[in-house]
Amino acid sequence: MSKLKFAILGCGRISYKHVEALINNNDEAELVALCDITEEKSIQRKEQYDSEISNSDVKIYTDYIEMLKNEDIDVVTIATESGYHAKHALDCINHGSHVLIEKPMALSVEDADQIIALAKEKEKKVCVSHQNRFNPPIQKLRRAIEEGRFGRLINGTARILWTRDNNYYKQAPWRGTKELDGGTLMNQCIHNIDLLQWMMGSEIVRIHSERDTFLRDIEMEDFGAILIRFKNGSIGIVEGSACVYPKNLEETLSIFGEKGTVVIGGLAVNEIKTWQFADEKDYDNEVGNTEIDSVYGEGHTPLYKDFIDAINNHTEPLINGEEGKKAMEIILRAYES
């Protein structure tokens, strides 16, 4: 089977992780094009790829429509500003490519639904980059959820206690804006909100939220709290901050049930802090913790592998469009509340 040909649209802050994932999946995928309106950014990513993959032939573009017309591309990774995700995804699907979209997949439910509908019409696949689902501790927790080890679920808590100073927002003026980004809930907290809703596994009955802009010079919130009531009766709690002094404190997911308690923390929900169940299983003593070098974790490589397999085997990726929409929709409902 020939390798899938990937292009990356948007070569900013997160793009090195996507290049790394393609390097690690080189047996089944190759990078053929990079596009960014700032050419120097694409050149940096090309150098990263070329340093690990010999005889590569990565083309550089500043116009993504020109890239789509000129290159034979199977998959486009979209890592542009959040407010452009929908337009870029729709254009790429219309040009015949599958799409892997950085979070959030869009900034409105209507746009997300358009992406999902067009992909089905064109028989293309969508994957949303919620890479923390592939963290070994998260996979272990998901197994316990699917085996019913918690009994009745009571509540789950997602805590994202980070700092993002004004310099962070000044580096890219689109950050913190309503039109292109959203606030702390949409930008920093969406990964953990995705994990929370994935574990609670139920439709949402109602959402309450409080949010404000305390310290940062941005249009949207730098702190937000969400209270979620799920259809199965359980309650979800989200605490998200970009104001923690003086540095990132934690990203923690806690799940509490009638017969189990699990807390996963670390820099990016990569370490099991508490694992207690009424029953015992062989895998309970498996550590599952992973070493990571940034808040982005190490989930991009298995995320890409899962998407590559879905394309080759005509199946659905773990985080398809419908799954990718869920956390985004929770946050939009919190904004409305």
Image: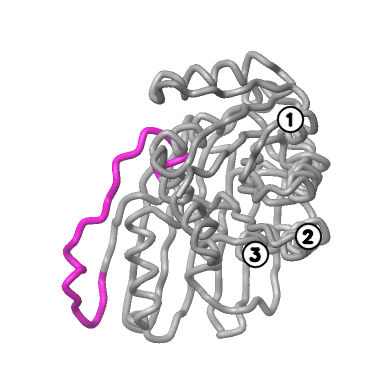
- Identified by mark 2, the residue type is Leu
Colour mapping used in the image:
one colour
- Identified by mark 3, the residue type is Lys
Q: CA distance from mark 1 to mark 2?
A: 22 Å
Mark 2 or mark 3, whichever is nearer to me? 2
Residue 243 % position (x, y): 58, 37
Say whether disc 1 or disc 2 marks the residue closer to the N-terminus: 1
Residue 51: assigned label: none
Of the pair 53 and 219, the residue shown nearer to us: 53
Q: Is residue 337 magenta?
A: no
| Residue on which the image places disc 3 | 326
Say above or below: 36 vs 180: above
Say above or below: 251 vs 237: above
> Which span of residues is magenta-colored?
276-298
Q: Is residue 248 left or right of residue 241?
A: left
Q: CA distance from mark 2 to mark 3?
A: 18 Å
- Identified by mark 1, the residue type is Asn
Q: In the picture, which quadrant includes the C terminus?
A: bottom right
Residue 206 % position (x, y): 70, 75
Residue 70: assigned label: 1
| Residue on which the image places disc 2 | 118
